[in-house]
Amino acid sequence: MTWKVISSATARWTFQQGVYSLCSDKDGRGMTSVLLAVVTFGVCFATLLVAVLAGEAIYRLVSPHLLEKPSGKGSKSGGAFELGEQEVSEGVEALMESIGPPPVEKCLRRHQLGDWGEIDDENRHLNGVSLGEGGSLGFESFYTMEGGTVLRILTFEDGSGTLLLTEEEYQGALLSMNGEDPQEEEEGVLRVRSLRDYMVREGSPKEGSPKGG
């Protein structure tokens, strides 16, 4: 291969131009790389910021429902449920004749709105689970009335009805069901009738009375 001879001045000029071009290309690539890194960082940071803000918004929206704990007076989530046909026992009739229907009606409204009164923690938890499952476990409430009489309110699992009875009747019914007190089984039979019939008989105003589905 034959070498091409050029003058020293030409060689020097060519060399200088080559070095200049090399430096210019290198600097250009360097600036491009830096710019690309800055843009990439900015995009990542913006994406992260949006994700954090979205997560915070979702947390604020969902957390009240996930972390809600029942208060001492019951879970007041406002999730009313259907009471169905409402029946009262003889003991509750006697209670209403003693203190009047309004206090009992008030407890029934509290029950329907998820205020379980003084029910124990286990049943309070079951009530909360039942609320989340459309009433699949039924509902139970417990209230101490004027004079010390304890009122129990039970809504059946299928939502067909709600029963109001006193604590004494409740315990007697449990003993009768369990066969633990056979001699008093007949006396322990729970007699109930429609709350609506009682109200009609007593001429109690219908306004404010809870209504079943």
Image (tube, rainbow, N blue to C red):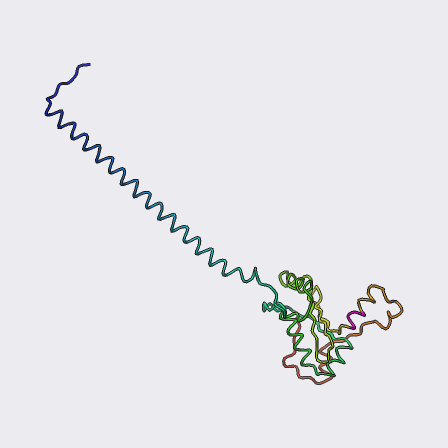
Q: Is residue 192 magenta?
A: no
As drawn, the residue found furthest toward the top would be 1
User: Horizontal and vertical percent for residue 125?
Assistant: 66, 62
**Quadrant for the N terminus in the image:** top left
166 sits left or right of 128 in the view: right
In the orientation shown, which residue stands out farthest toward the right? 183
- Identify the residue at image location x=64%, y=73%: 110
x 50%, y 58%: residue: 59
In this view of the protein, which residue sits in the foreground, 15 or 43?
Answer: 15
| 91 displayed left or right of 124 | right
Write down the quadrant of residue 75 in the picture. Answer: bottom right
Determine the image quadrant of residue 66: bottom right
Using the image, determine if residue 113 lies above or below residue 125: below
Return the residue found at the far bottom: 203
Provide residue 123's location: percent of width, then percent of height.
69, 64
Q: What stretch is highlighted in magenta?
A: 168-172
| Point 43% across, 56% down: residue | 53
Q: Foreground residue, 115 or 196?
A: 115
Residue 179 drawn at (x, y percent): 85, 64
Tell me, yes or no, whether the highlighted magenta stretch contains residue 170.
Answer: yes
Report the quarter where the C terminus lies: bottom right
- In the image, residue 83 lies at what x, y percent? 67, 70
Count of marks overlaid on the render = 0
Residue sitting at x 32%, y 43%: 36
Q: In which quarter of the image is residue 93?
A: bottom right
- Depth check: give the residue in front, 77 or 122: 122
Secondary structure mostly taken by the magenta-highlighted segment of the chain: helix
